[in-house]
Image (cartoon, rainbow, N blue to C red):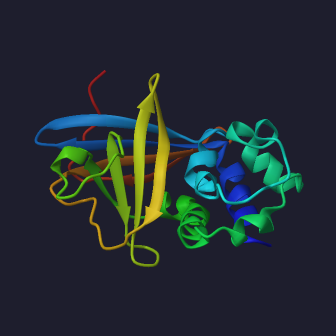
Amino acid sequence: MGLFLEAAKSWKSLLNTSYTFIIGHKKTAETIHLCFRPVDFDHLSGIHKADDIDFKLHRNTFRGEKLADAVISGKLNDGLIEKSMHWGQISDRLSDITCLEKILDSDFRIYRFNPCKLGFYSDIKANYLIYSEQYQMGIFLFIDRDHHVDYCKSIFSKDDRDYTANQTKWTMLKKIKYHNDMEEILFVSASYHEPEQ
C-alpha cells in the first residue's frame, strides 16, 4: 500500500471521530471541538504541492472533499504523486496524517497560535497549534475555526523552524474522544473542576 493510500484510509477512519479539548491559561478556559471533514484532507495531504504531476483526471473529479475517496477507490493513481519533485515534503505530511489519531490520543503540547510572534515569516493563520514529539523529529498540527467548527488546517513535521517559539502555551484540563457516538475520557487534570450547572 502506498503512503498516499494509507493516509487517505487513516483520514477516512477519522470522519466518525471528534475530540473535545478543554484548555486553560491564567484562570481562563477555552474549549476546542475538533472534527474531521472530508474536505480538509485535500490541503493536509499536500497534493497542492504536486502541481508538476498530471493525474490524468479533471481536477473537479478528485480534489476537495472527493480526494480521499478518489485515492481509496483507485480512481486516482496514488503512486503518481511519488514522482513529484516535492515528494519529500508531501510524504512527510502523509506520514504525519497516518499518526494523527495516535498523536491526539497521547500527550502533546498546545498553544494559542499567533504567527506575528514568530521570529520568521509564516502565512499560516490558525487559532491553535499542537506540537507532538511522539514521532520523528516532532509534528506540528494547526487548528483553525470556520463557522464555529474547529478543524485541522495544516500538518507537517518539524524542520529547522520552531513554530512554538514565542507562542502562549496552554494547559490541557480535559480531553474527550468521541467515536461512533461512544465517549471516552482520555485525560482529566487534577486541577480541573467541572463548571457548576
Give the residue at the far left of this rendering.
Answer: 26
- In the rendered image, which quarter is residue 132 located in? bottom left
Q: Tell me if 23 is positioned left or right of 52 in this view.
A: left
Q: Is residue 92 visible?
A: yes
Does residue 196 lie above or below 66 as drawn? above
- In the rendered image, which quarter is residue 78 located in? bottom right
Q: Position of residue 151 (x, y in %)?
A: 49, 39
Q: Position of residue 102 (x, y in %)?
A: 53, 64
Q: Which of 129 and 116 is in front in this view?
A: 116
Does residue 85 lie above or below 147 as drawn? below
Q: Which residue is drawn at 29% across and 67% down?
A: 161
Q: How many numbered callouts?
A: 0
For the C terminus, the image quarter is top left
Q: Which residue is drawn at 47% across and 56% down?
A: 155
Q: Nearer the viewer, residue 148 or 68?
A: 68
Q: Where is residue 143 in the image (x, y as percent from the top left)?
A: 41, 44
- In the rendered image, which quarter is residue 65 located in? top right
Q: Is residue 192 visible?
A: no
Q: Which residue is drawn at 26% across and 25% down?
A: 196
For the N terminus, the image quarter is bottom right
Q: Tell me if 102 is positioned left or right of 82 in this view.
A: left
Q: Position of residue 9 (x, y in %)?
A: 74, 57
Give the residue at the far bottom of this rendering.
Answer: 136
Q: Tell me if 161 is positioned left or right of 48 in this view.
A: left
Q: Which residue is drawn at 56% across and 59% down?
A: 101
Q: Which of 150 and 162 is in front in this view?
A: 162
